[in-house]
Amino acid sequence: MMKRRLQLSCIILISLLFAFATHAQDDVCQTDTDGMVYHMERAGYLRGSNQYELALFHYQCAYNIDDQSLPVVKGLGYVNIYLQRFETALAYFQYAVNLDEQSALNYLNLGWVQFLLTQQREAEGVDPEAINGFYNQSIIYYNRALDLDPNYEYVYYNRGQVYEAVDEYT
């Protein structure tokens, strides 16, 4: 019985030390190639754990190392969506399109965040003419995604949501 308690205590102590060591690194940006791997792994883990502010920090560290990395740029876009910072997310997804204009996923992301931003603006009472323009921009992005990949079923679903929102709005 005593041996089991000692083993359990050791496991708890090791877990706490690991958690402390991991947390201690959370506020330091590493700037080398190994740092890129570390920050992307941490960002992915933290995003999956709904710790979006910390994930954002690690994506930004990775971005400081390589601002041309599409996974980093898209990660910044996704995390900003989760934080409901839609304008910032839109900027990152526009940059992702600039990095790879032939990616249907990039246009899907752009259409999605444009749709979310439009809904936010609609809730804030923005001018109806402007709202229709924002919805139309989202449709343009989805159409571009379909131009690149006509079999991308998820784009049809998302574009349908925009059409439904426009019908409800007008």
Image (cartoon, helix red, strand yellow):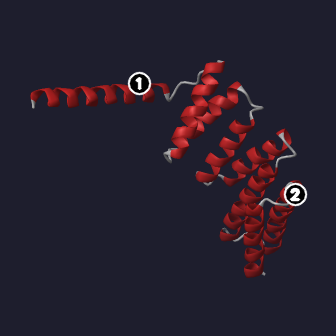
Residue 160 in the image: x percent, y percent?
A: 76, 71
Residue 33 in the image: x percent, y percent?
A: 66, 20
- Residue most extreme to the left: 1
Q: Which numbered disc covers residue 116?
A: none
Residue drawn at the location 83% of the way across and 65% of the way down: 139
Q: Quadrant of residue 131?
A: bottom right
Query: Which of 104/140 is in front?
Result: 104
The local secondary structure at tag 2 comes to helix
Disc 2: CA contacts within 10 A as few (<14), some (14-19) or many (>=20): many
Query: Which of 125/99 is in front?
Result: 99
Image position of 77 with respect to 141: above or below:
above
Direction from residue 30 to residue 21 in the image, left or right: left
Image position of 76 with respect to 29: above or below:
below
Specify whether residue 31 is in view: no
Residue type pointed to by label 2 = Arg
> Which of the two labelled residues, at mark 2 and mark 1, occupies the earlier sequence position?
1
Q: Which residue is mark 1?
A: 21
Residue 133 in the image: x percent, y percent?
A: 84, 67
Specify whether residue 4 is in view: yes
Direction from residue 33 to residue 153 in the image, left or right: right
Residue type pointed to by label 1 = Ala
Residue drawn at the location 83% of the way across and 73% of the way down: 129
Q: Quadrant of the N terminus?
A: top left
Residue drawn at the location 69% of the way across and 71% of the way down: 125
> In this rendering, which labeled residue sits more in front, label 2 or label 1?
2
Q: Which residue is mark 2?
A: 144
Residue 29 in the image: x percent, y percent?
A: 58, 24
Q: Quadrant of the C terminus?
A: bottom right
Whether the residues at callouts 2 and 1 have beta carbons within 8 Å, the answer is no
Image position of 134 with respect to 102: above or below:
below
Disc 1: CA contacts within 10 A as few (<14), some (14-19) or many (>=20): few
- Residue most extreme to the right: 147
